[in-house]
């Protein structure tokens, strides 16, 4: 359902049922499919078997990564972007979970964050007409710098306002971090007094 809904998100951004919307829908489909396959094959090569959760996560990585490019790239660009999304987001997930030990529910940052950054930067390359995209007024290198500036500005903006939001929330709620005991027990029980799963 997420895959189908994403068509409305990307193709609907054209605000018309025209060729632009059709291409956005096509590249969204290609990005999701190639992302799921790339993730599946990478997971298979690493652990000896693919998982349904991995395939679905690869699909989400493909969708998140193709979104910045969906109105600008062609099918070949979508295939490359989706494949890179599956591979790079898989590695980012493994790094965040296993190397720096961050418990990121649903792998939101390595899938959506890393994928979004990757897709934003790759748009500068694959939107070029020489790679089957719609073409740009700027050169690939100039457009890449523009995209990179947007990524860096967004990271700074989000970091500042996240810190502000956390500090304001701490004023009203105290420490936002649960105790180790509550974390081990589960916040369903410690904070809400009920269990979600038996």
Image: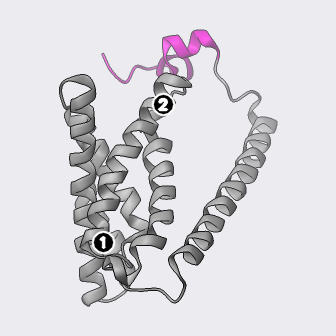
Disc number for residue 95: 2
**SS for tag 2?**
helix
Residue 181, horizontal then vertical, whole percent: 59, 9
Q: Residue at x 44, y 20 (%)?
A: 194
Above or below, 167 relative to 137: above
Look at the image and tell me in which quarter the N terminus lies: bottom left
Magenta: predominant secondary structure element? helix
**Mark 2 or mark 1, earlier in chain:** 1
Q: Residue at x 40, y 58 (%)?
A: 65
Residue 72: quarter of image: bottom left
Q: Is residue 25 magenta?
A: no
Image-quadrant location for residue 141: bottom right
Does the magenta portion include 188? yes
Residue 57 badge: none
Disc 2/disc 1 C-alpha distance (Å): 32 Å
Depth check, front residue: 12 or 116:
116
In the displayed structure, 169 sits above or below 189; it is below
Residue 8 numbered mark, or none:
1
Asked whether, in this view, residue 23 is left or right of residue 134, the answer is: left
The answer to whether residue 17 is seen in the rendering is no
- Label 2 vs label 1, nearer the camera: 2
Q: Position of residue 178 (x, y in %)?
A: 64, 21
What are the residue bounds of the magenta stretch? 179-198
User: Viewer-proximal residue, 77 or 68?
Assistant: 77
Q: Is 178 on the left or on the right of 108, as rendered?
A: right
Determine whether, in the image, residue 92 is placed left or right of residue 177: left
- Badge 2 local density, few (<14 within 10 Å), some, or many (20+)? some
Q: Is residue 121 visible?
A: yes
Q: Quadrant of the C terminus?
A: top left
């Amino acid at each position: 359902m997420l895959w189908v809904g994403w068509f409305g998100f990307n193709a609907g951004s054209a605000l018309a049922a025209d060729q632009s919307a059709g291409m956005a829908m096509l590249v969204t489909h290609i990005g999701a499919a190639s992302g799921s396959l790339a993730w599946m094959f990478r997971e298979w090569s690493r652990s000896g078997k693919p998982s349904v959760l991995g395939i679905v996560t690869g699909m989400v990585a493909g969708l998140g990564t193709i979104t910045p490019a969906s109105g600008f790239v062609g099918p070949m660009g979508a295939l490359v972007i989706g494949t890179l999304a599956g591979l790079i987001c898989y590695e980012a997930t493994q790094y965040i979970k296993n190397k720096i030990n961050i418990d990121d529910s649903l792998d939101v940052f390595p899938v959506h964050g890393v994928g979004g950054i990757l897709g934003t930067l790759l748009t500068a390359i694959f939107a070029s007409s020489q790679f089957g995209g719609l073409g740009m007024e700027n050169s690939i290198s100039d457009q890449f710098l523009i995209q990179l500036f947007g990524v860096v500005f967004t990271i700074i903006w989000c970091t500042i306002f996240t810190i502000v939001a956390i500090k304001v929330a701490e004023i009203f709620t105290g420490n936002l971090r649960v105790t180790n005991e509550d974390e081990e027990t589960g916040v369903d029980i410690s904070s809400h007094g009920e269990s979600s799963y038996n």
